[in-house]
Image (cartoon, helix red, strand yellow):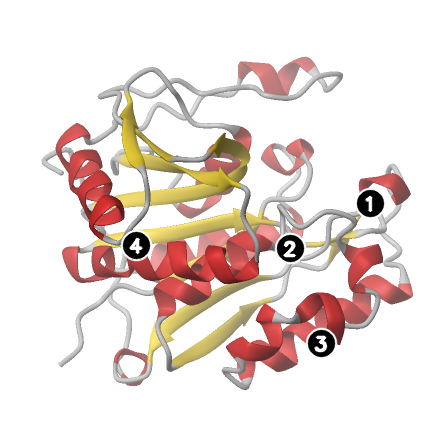
C-alpha cells in the first residue's frame, strides 16, 4: 500500500489573508484536521528566491519574517513559532544535490509570509517542524517541475510538501476591498482546474500559451511556478482535490490543490494528530 503523504499547492493571497481567512482559510483549516500527522512540513514560496542555487532553512527556531509593509499593526504582531529540523534540512540538501541542483543550508533564514500565513490555518498549533526551500533563479515551468521531482522522495519520509503561490497574481489590477472577481480570473482558474483534474501536467507546463488570459493572470511567473513544483512532487499520475477559495481583491483566485498518488487516493485520510513532532 502506498503510504506517501499528499502534496499541497496553496494560494497564499495577500498578507491580509493572515487575519481574514475567508473561504480559503476555512478550506485549509478543514484539510489540516484531515491530514495524517507529518514528520515535518517543507514549504516552497516565491518570496524567497536565490540566484543560481537552492537554499534550505537550517535554523532550529526559524523566525517569523514580516516581509511586507503598509499593513495593520495586527499583522506584524503575528508569530508562527514552529521549530525547524536541521537534520532533515541536511537530508533535503543531499537530495537536491544528488538530483543535480546546487543546494546548501541557510542557518539564518526564517519563514516568509508565503510560508507561515497559510500554515496559520493548515497547522495552527505550530508544533510540527517547518523547513523552507528557496526557489532558484532563473526558473521556468520545466525547471520548477524538475525541482518538485527532486523533492518527491520526501513524501515517503512522512514529510508534507506545501508549494505556496497564487493561482492568479496580477497586483497591477488590485481592487482593494472588492470581492468581485474579474472575468479573466475566473476563466484562468477554471482552465487550471480542468487541466489539473484531468492530470494533464503537459498543459500546465505550457500554460503561458494555452491558458486564457495567462499573461494577465500572471504578468510574471513566480507565483504560478510553485504549482509546477507541486506537480513534480506529485509524480506522473495523481488524483486532484480542488479546495475552492473564492476570489479576493478582484484579482486573486484563492483556490488550492491537494495531489494524491493514485493508489493513496483510494484510502481514507487519517485525522491530523496535533502532537509534537520535534524529533524530525
Label 4: how many Cα within 10 Å (few below 14, some 14–19, many 20+): many
The quarter in which the C terminus is drawn is top left
How many residues crowd mark 1 within 10 Å: few (<14), some (14–19), many (20+)? Answer: some
> Residue at 76% across / 68% down in the picture?
188
Q: Which label's residue is closer to the chain start, 4 or 3?
A: 4
- Residue 83 is left or right of residue 44, and the answer is left
Front residue of 102/120: it is 102
Can the viewer see residue 189?
yes
Tell me residue 49's x, y (percent): 51, 33
Q: Are marks 4 and 1 in contact (CB under 8 Å)?
A: no
Visible in this render: residue 37?
no
Q: What is the CA distance from the residue labelled 2 to the residue labelled 4?
A: 29 Å
Using the numbered discs, state the Cα–Cα distance from disc 1 to disc 2 in whole angstroms: 13 Å
Lower sequence index among marks 4 and 1: 4
Q: Which residue is mark 3?
A: 191
Q: Secondary structure at mark 1?
A: loop
Q: Earlier in the sequence, mark 1 or mark 2?
A: 2
Q: Which mark is residue 154?
A: none
Return the residue at label 2.
Answer: 23
Q: Nearer the viewer, residue 239 or 35?
A: 239
* Marks 3 and 2, how far apart at CA: 20 Å
Residue found 28% across the figure and 70% down from its top: 269
Residue indicated by mark 1? 249
Amino acid at each position: 500500500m502506498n503510504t506517501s503523504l499528499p502534496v499541497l499547492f496553496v494560494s497564499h493571497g495577500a498578507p491580509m489573508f493572515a487575519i481574514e481567512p475567508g473561504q480559503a482559510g476555512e478550506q485549509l483549516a478543514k484539510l489540516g484536521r484531515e491530514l495524517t500527522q507529518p514528520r515535518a512540513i517543507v514549504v516552497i514560496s516565491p518570496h524567497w528566491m536565490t540566484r543560481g542555487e537552492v537554499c534550505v532553512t537550517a535554523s532550529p527556531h526559524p523566525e517569523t519574517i514580516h516581509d511586507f509593509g503598509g499593513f495593520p499593526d495586527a499583522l506584524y504582531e503575528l508569530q508562527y513559532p514552529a521549530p525547524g529540523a536541521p537534520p532533515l534540512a541536511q537530508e533535503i540538501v543531499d537530495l537536491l544535490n544528488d538530483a543535480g541542483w546546487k543546494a546548501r543550508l541557510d542557518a539564518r533564514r526564517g519563514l516568509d509570509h508565503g510560508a507561515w500565513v497559510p500554515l496559520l490555518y493548515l497547522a495552527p498549533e505550530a508544533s510540527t517542524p517547518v523547513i523552507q526551500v528557496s526557489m532558484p533563479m532563473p526558473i521556468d515551468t520545466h525547471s520548477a517541475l524538475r525541482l518538485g521531482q527532486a523533492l518527491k522522495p520526501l513524501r515517503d519520509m512522512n514529510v508534507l510538501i506545501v508549494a505556496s503561490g497564487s493561482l492568479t497574481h496580477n497586483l497591477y489590477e488590485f481592487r482593494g476591498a472588492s470581492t468581485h472577481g474579474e472575468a479573466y480570473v475566473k476563466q484562468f482558474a477554471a482552465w487550471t482546474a480542468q487541466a489539473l483534474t484531468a492530470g494533464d501536467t503537459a498543459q500546465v507546463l505550457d500554460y503561458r500559451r494555452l491558458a486564457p488570459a495567462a499573461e494577465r493572470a500572471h504578468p510574471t511567473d513566480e507565483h504560478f511556478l510553485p504549482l509546477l513544483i507541486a506537480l513534480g512532487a506529485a509524480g506522473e499520475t495523481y488524483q486532484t482535490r480542488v479546495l475552492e477559495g473564492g476570489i479576493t481583491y478582484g484579482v486573486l483566485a484563492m483556490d488550492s490543490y491537494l495531489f494524491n498518488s493514485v493508489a493513496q487516493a483510494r484510502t481514507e485520510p487519517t485525522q491530523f494528530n496535533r502532537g509534537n513532532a520535534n524529533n524530525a
